Image (tube, rainbow, N blue to C red):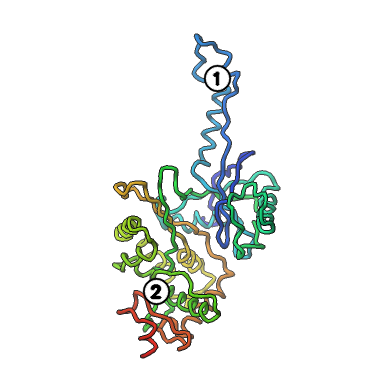
């Protein structure tokens, strides 16, 4: 049943569709699209004088109206295209996985909706890749669809779009034209790793962040950006602290805190993470799909769209995105990461004295400063 799930008829991106670079992550690039809507031919209206109203609908206008209805599928959508990496799957495969595995876990309003779209001309990807390459190599390129005035981030250089005949149309969760604001964050591991030692003082994300911070300080690149403990996002955690770590604007911070205290999305996400991976990577057959799905849910993104007026916060739109099923190629990385966090003492706060980091995790009964930790 699951492997043979039918996918609805795939629309074709219309000719002359405008495509504008919006943003990119490690695995995908997101574009804005502007689809040209047809208009009735002038002859359908101009042949009637001022005193002779045209018929309710001519054959020409009827066809245009029907075509416009078909194009509504592109309304309030972005185009997401995958990069040419070993860990990305063809969009058609990703869509089947999403329908089969992700959709049953959440209500429709809790996830960024997506559908397949055929890209049309066979050279569409080649043209976009040419733009990306030009954006990297020239200080002032003719960007065409690239609307950023900045150069492409160096860490993204050399990685381009895969030759895929499909892309994905996804819900546009960017700010609207009415003064809406969007908060975007990754909630990460909302429950402790099942593989963590029982005497852990850090959760999985805090342990991983402490190790990354230590490496950053050791190699001279400086401390990484501030982060929050994911355990504070659910189950009566310190949501005021999280809101202050995520937002500097006082009004926006207060609105975020209220949402964190009342939302049902993050508790559902945590429960799904736990249900799908109850044993951890060392005691699970890594060929099982559930572990890949659990890891997907631990690396998804929350998009919060705030209405212009605080009094309308009951209408806040919150959706999970970046829900492509993780590749089997990640298995070795997951095993190595857990082994390092355990063997090097990052979970328990017993890391090498020279690399010692503060313990700021919700798992700890009290916050331990770097100085006091080194004195113990």
* Mark seen at residue 196: none
Circle 2 residue: 192
Left or right: 358 in relation to 127? left
Q: Residue at x 47, y 62 (%)?
A: 300
Residue 75 at x, y percent in the picture: 50, 41
Label 2 environment density (alpha carbons within 10 Å; few <14, some 14–19, many ≥20)? some
Q: Residue furthest top?
A: 51
Q: Residue at x 30, y 60 (%)?
A: 261
Which numbered dot is residue 58? 1
90 with respect to 278 (left or right): right
Residue 361 is at least partly visible in this image: yes
Q: Where residue 210 appears, x then y in whole percent? A: 45, 77
Q: Secondary structure at mark 2?
A: loop
Q: Is residue 107 visible?
A: no
Front residue of 79 and 10:
79
Q: Residues within 10 Å of mark 1 (few under 14, many from 20)?
A: few
Q: How far apart in space, not on screen, are marks 2 and 1 (Cα)?
A: 64 Å
Tally the marks. Answer: 2
Q: Is residue 220 left or right of residue 280?
A: right
Q: Earlier in the sequence, mark 2 or mark 1?
A: 1
């Amino acid at each position: 049943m699951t492997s043979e799930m039918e996918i609805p008829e795939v629309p074709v991106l219309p000719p002359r569709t405008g495509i504008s670079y919006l943003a990119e992550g490690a695995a995908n690039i997101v574009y804005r699209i502007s689809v040209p809507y047809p208009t009735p031919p002038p002859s359908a209206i101009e042949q009637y004088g001022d005193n002779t109203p045209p018929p309710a609908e001519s054959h020409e206008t009827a066809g245009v109206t029907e075509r416009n209805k078909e194009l509504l599928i592109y309304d309030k959508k972005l185009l997401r295209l995958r990069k040419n990496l070993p860990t990305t799957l063809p969009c058609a495969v990703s869509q089947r996985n999403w329908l089969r595995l992700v959709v049953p876990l959440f209500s429709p309003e809790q996830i960024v909706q997506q559908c397949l779209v055929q890209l049309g001309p066979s050279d569409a990807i080649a043209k976009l890749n040419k733009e990306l390459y030009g954006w990297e190599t020239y200080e002032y390129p003719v960007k065409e669809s690239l609307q950023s005035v900045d150069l492409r981030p160096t860490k993204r250089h050399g990685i381009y779009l895969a030759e895929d005949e499909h892309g994905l149309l996804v819900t546009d969760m960017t700010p609207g034209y009415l003064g809406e604001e969007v908060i975007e964050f990754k909630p990460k591991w909302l429950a402790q790793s099942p593989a963590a030692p029982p005497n852990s003082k850090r959760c999985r994300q805090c342990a991983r962040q402490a190790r990354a911070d230590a490496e950053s300080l050791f190699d001279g690149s400086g401390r990484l950006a501030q982060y929050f403990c994911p355990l504070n996002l659910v189950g009566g955690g310190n949501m005021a602290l999280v809101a202050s770590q995520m937002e500097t604007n006082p009004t926006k911070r207060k609105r975020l805190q209220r949402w964190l205290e009342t939302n049902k999305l993050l508790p559902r996400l945590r429960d799904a993470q736990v249900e799908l991976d109850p044993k951890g990577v060392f005691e699970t057959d890594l060929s099982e799909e559930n572990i890949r799905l659990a890891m997907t849910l631990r690396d998804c993104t929350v998009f919060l769209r705030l209405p212009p007026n605080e009094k309308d916060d009951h209408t806040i739109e919150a959706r999970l995105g970046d829900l492509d099923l993780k590749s089997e190629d990640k298995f070795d990385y997951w095993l190595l990461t857990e082994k390092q966090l355990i063997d090097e003492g990052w979970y328990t706060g017993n890391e090498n004295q020279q690399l010692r980091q503060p313990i700021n995790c919700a798992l700890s009964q009290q916050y331990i400063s770097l100085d006091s930790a080194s004195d113990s």
